[in-house]
Image (cartoon, rainbow, N blue to C red):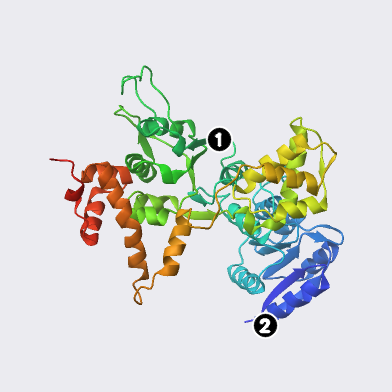
Amino acid sequence: MSRRALLVEDDASIATVITAALEAEAFTVDRCDSIASRDKLLSGATYDVMLTDVVLTDGDGIASLPEVHRAHPAMPVIILSAQNTLDTAVRATDTGAFEYFPKPFDLDELVRAACQAADARSGGSAGRDEAGEGLPLIGRSQAMQDVYRMITRVLRNDLTVLILGESGTGKELVAEAIHELGSRKTGPFVAVNTAAIPRELIESELFGHEKGAFTGAVNRSIGKFEQANGGTLFLDEIGDMPPEAQTRLLRALQSGRIRRVGGREEIAIDVRIIAATNRDLAPMIAAGSFREDLYYRLNVVPIHLPPLRERRSDIEALARHFLRQAAEEGLPSRRISNDALALLEAQPWRGNVRELRNFVFRAALLSREEQIDTAGVRQLLADRPAMPEASGEATFSGALASWLGKSVPAQGALYDEALAAFEIPLFEHALRETGGNQLRAAQLLGINRNTLRKRLDDLRIDPERFSRRG
């Protein structure tokens, strides 16, 4: 069955490629390059889908979309844009776009979306009058485009989001963007770093406590869940949450109700949960230190934040943004040379965007010239505290890599041998520290006692060897 598409694109080469790809899927394609010609075509024909660029010869392709939706409410719209910012992605979503594709895009994916849109013939308008400026996430790399697209897909729903990424990549900024641009923006945004709360206080911090619930509880205290009611609760470093708190968190997520520590009353809560971690949760689940059922509750929509080394093309924009930010905060106004930027782009930035920001602020403060040059950057790089190398036997990863390079396991036995090489000294250390007490060793390791006992049996480790009796 032939389907009809309207392509609004002022780049002739891109338009030709898209047209050929759509025609190969039995589309009849009409092309134009302006809002005026688009409106003329729409007035005389019905289309199954419209694909439109943002910057056209006579205006903004997104700004006029509400009028298009009113006149053609059943026609889905796919937006293409070289203005690859979070702002553009949000504008595209808020104007009711079926899908948004930053340029350069995957042609097969675009055609697939056009087919789905034409078959669905669904549309609608969300209702944002004006796009916000100064959004916190910066970058036009493909890696960040993927992040922007995932953010836009969760703005109009309350699905739980799990943000994954190394320290310093901006996980809290993503959480704030989802809250501030989403349907809960009028409610509170409450962030809590679960790794920074003492183990014995975390349940009280999250769920609150009643007066007299424990020593020092002289008054009733409202926890983070109640503080975030009607808004968003951001649980940072969720991988560091102790097991007992994980159990209560899971119960709260399942029931939508909490109970303060020492309380009897169950309290209904209405919060959106966004969690984040810089840890790989899979091996923690396998070791029994992170609940698998909680993981699936949190990991409804995962958003993976790339490390800065995987989006080096964004370093220039980030550096210039941080220089402007530094000036706004009272530091000297500085510029940076292209050569100095190239030097920044060559760095590993193991601390990611946070490390880059601190470096740029330091450069703005210490530079004696209005323009930061390569000499100044090199001097600051040389003055940085020495960081442990990412390779070499001085690190655990380096030692493991060295072991792998020297070992010759039987076919199919590499995983088991590597796991045993890791677990045997780890478990022996825990048993040695606890005098062979398996319960205390399991607590030290942060795993279930039954898991420890099974692995000790599998590895033929006798805990009695470490007993301090006699």
How crowded pointer 1 is (Cα within 10 Å; few <14, some 14-19, many 20+) is rated as: some
Q: Position of residue 86 (x, y in %)?
A: 68, 51
Give residue 356's mark.
Answer: none
Amino acid type of the residue that numbered disc 1 sits on in the rendered structure: Gly
Give residue 187's mark.
Answer: 1
Verify CB contact (< 8 Å) between mark 1 and mark 2. no
- Give above or below for 423 relative to 133: below
Left-right relation of 27 to 120: right
Q: Which residue is farthest top?
A: 218
Left-right relation of 200 to 184: left
State the quadrant of the N terminus.
bottom right
Amino acid type of the residue that numbered disc 2 sits on in the rendered structure: Ala
- Residue drawn at the location 82% of the way across and 73% of the way down: 12
Q: Position of residue 269 (x, y in %)?
A: 42, 36
Label 1, label 2: how many angstroms apart (C-alpha)?
48 Å
Q: Nearest the camera: 233 or 469?
A: 469
Q: Position of residue 470 (x, y in %)?
A: 12, 40
Query: Which of the 4 quarters of the picture holds residue 117?
Result: bottom right
Q: Which is nearer the N-term, disc 1 or disc 2?
A: 2
Q: Secondary structure at mark 2?
A: loop
- Give above or below for 12 relative to 60: below
Q: Secondary structure at mark 1?
A: loop
Left-right relation of 194 to 303: left
Left-right relation of 253 to 100: left
- Residue drawn at the location 56% of the way across and 40% of the way down: 184
- Give above or below for 469 relative to 23: above
Residue 133 appears anywhere in the view: no
Give residue 24's mark.
Answer: 2
- Residue drawn at the location 50% of the way across and 55% of the way down: 302
Q: Position of residue 87 (x, y in %)?
A: 70, 50
